[in-house]
Image (cartoon, coloured by chain):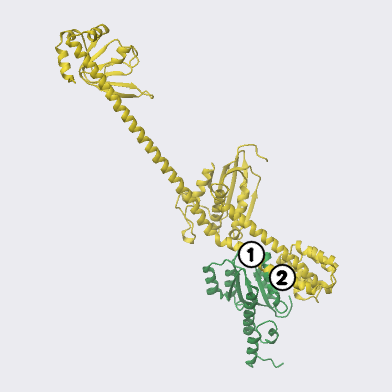
Amino acid sequence: MKNKAEIYILIVEDEAGVLSAIVRDMEYFEEQFPIEMTESVEEARDVVKNILDHNGQLGLVICDHILPGTHGADFLVELQNDEKTAKAMNVLLTGQAGLDETIKAINEGGLKHFIAKPWDKDELINISIKLLTDYVIQNENDLLPYMKLLDQERIAAELHKGSRLSDR
Amino acid sequence: MINRHTILALIEEDSVLRSMDQSVFMANDVILKEGDSNRYLYLLMKGEVELHKEGPDNNKVHIDQLEPGDLVGLVSFVSGRPALTSAIALSEVSLLRINHREFEELVEGTNSLSTLFHQLIVDNLLNRYQNTIGLQMKYENLNRQLHQERDQLRAALNQIEAVQQQLVSQEKMALLGELSAGISHELNNPSAALARSVEHLNESLSQIIVQVKGLTSDQLNQVLNIGRTDKPMGTMDVRKKTVQLEAKYPKLDRTLTRKLARCSEDARSYFMREIPRKLLSEAMEVYEAGQILSIMGESTRRITSLVQSLRSFIRPTTGYETHLDVREGLLSTIQLLHHKLKSHELDLDLQDIPAVAGNPGELNQVWTNILDNACDALINQKGKITIRTCHEKNRVFINIINSGPNIPDEVKKRIFDANYTTKNTNGTFGLGIGLTITKDIISKHRGYIQVLDAEGGGAWFRIILPATREKSEN
């Protein structure tokens, strides 16, 4: 792990082929946001702990629902209820979550977005841009570097509010 | 026709007849015994006589009841053959006993007594003939009634079979409904991977065409092949490897480092050994194209085999095969239930077993029911499901054990009853006849099912099926 307080993207998907496909779609962000791949909630918990231990931040979680052991929606609820990870944005990416589980994820887990499999790359990228932009606006002081990959208009608007413009 | 009573009255008046032997029998006395020869013809004057014949189970079959004026022993007397029936006095009776000589005189005589006697014989024969016609009619009626009842029973049986068949397929459809969400998820994953891969390969090929300039065609070929066959590392190993690679090659960009970390050890050492650093990202693009192809192949295989499992599950219930490997059905059921089973530890011990005869679709319904129940028993916990096949002489054993709660004895007693379910609270939409139908199907296959306590807790379903009769290959 790098020393810099980087903003991580965490992907949880137990099927190797699907995981590879998600990661390949998300490569766009990788030069600024390190991507962590995990195959189960158990493993994801370890990775989150490791990120936080190394002063990293959890920015975005893209999670499948049907996972061995703990379900994705439950994991998102768990992250939301933990103050250390409550700020993280999340996407439930699944072909199966029933209405009850989706409602639970929205009500209790502050589910930001739900994408049905098979997904569309532009949809996944655009949602991720929006959510990561939300994240940096809410949590970062220096927004300028994020203009390259994230929502330029919103970041520019935020910068023009004046107080956020760095004078260094 | 002359009234019988008139004849009897006249006979009683006649001096010739009155001089003949008068026999008196008390109630239950045997006048004539079935099978015995008979030297006399009796004319019943007073009281009542029953004729009966011995039935097939030594029971007495009632033939007729005789009244005064009836002749007793006529057939055996005239024909000389053994008596067809036994004649028993029902009350005190008096009979006129006529021997052969007297009979001949009576028959051949021309006086008024003979005429009366002739009339008496004709009347007796007419009576018997009428009785025979009546009996024949009664027999016909009974026969028709029997036929009708048999047809009704047959129709009822057919109806029961049809209803049973309908229930089996309704339960199958309910089960399928319950599974459909999971199956669609199972299909969705490879189909999502496939859909994304097509697009990725598209992008990748364009990039390869534009970017790849430095690699020889040999290298291109090799890298593509490695990509096609490489088995990437698990995510935990990828993280460890990433840390090592970051330390060793700090100048490589993050994406390339991650991709290298995901390759197998062999692929990685090939890259580091054979490919110049500045061509590494070109080579990685080619490797990835190979990986995408491999994902596409794997996804296609999974979709195909899932569709096959589904097909064998919904196969019409009429298909009957003499040499079934039960394990194939178990494996395709496991595939259908993968989305539910993958939350638990699955211990498969499928030993070689002889073939059984039966309907693969129906047997799959059995495995699906029991495995689905096992998953439901383990809801909200990570449990263990053990599937073990073995055999002993001509019997095949299929054991399906879950580590969930023990089934209480009172539930065990009723678990195979229709409409007995413990699942209503969970909002599943089974009909509550899953295990009833399971038992029916197994009985139909001449097997049986038992529910036992597993060692160390949990429910143990044991199904025993007869092996196909013949020398098995193993």
Query: Amino acid type of disc 2?
Result: Asn
Q: Which chain does the residue under circle 1 lie in?
A: B
Q: In the image, which lettered chain appears yellow?
A: B
Return the x and y of residue B158 as percentages of the image width and height. Answer: 44, 44
Q: Is residue B28 left or right of residue B322?
A: left
Q: Which chain does the residue under circle 2 lie in?
A: B
Which residue has dot 1 on it? B191
B174 over B392 or under it: above or below: below
Q: In the image, which lettered chain appears green?
A: A
Q: Residue at x 66, y 71 (%)?
A: A11
Return the x and y of residue B432 as percentages of the image width and height. Answer: 47, 54
Q: Residue at x 60, y 65 (%)?
A: A66
Quadrant occupied by the C terminus of chain B = top right
Asked which quadrant contains residue B191, the reply is bottom right
Q: Is residue B311 left or right of residue B84?
A: right
B233 over B384 or under it: above or below: below
Spot the residue most to the left. Answer: B13
Neighbour tally class for label 1: few under 14, some 14-19, many 20 plus, Cα within 10 Å: many
Query: Amino acid type of disc 1?
Result: Ser
Marked residue nearer the N-terminal end (2 or 1)? 1
B38 or B186, nearer to the observer: B38
Secondary structure beneath disc 1?
A: helix
Q: Can residue B228 be seen in the rendering of this structure?
A: yes
Neighbour tally class for label 2: few under 14, some 14-19, many 20 plus, Cα within 10 Å: few
Return the x and y of residue B23 as percentages of the image width and height. Answer: 22, 12
Asked which quadrant contains residue B6, the reply is top left
A120 or B437, nearer to the observer: A120
Which residue has dot 2 on it? B202
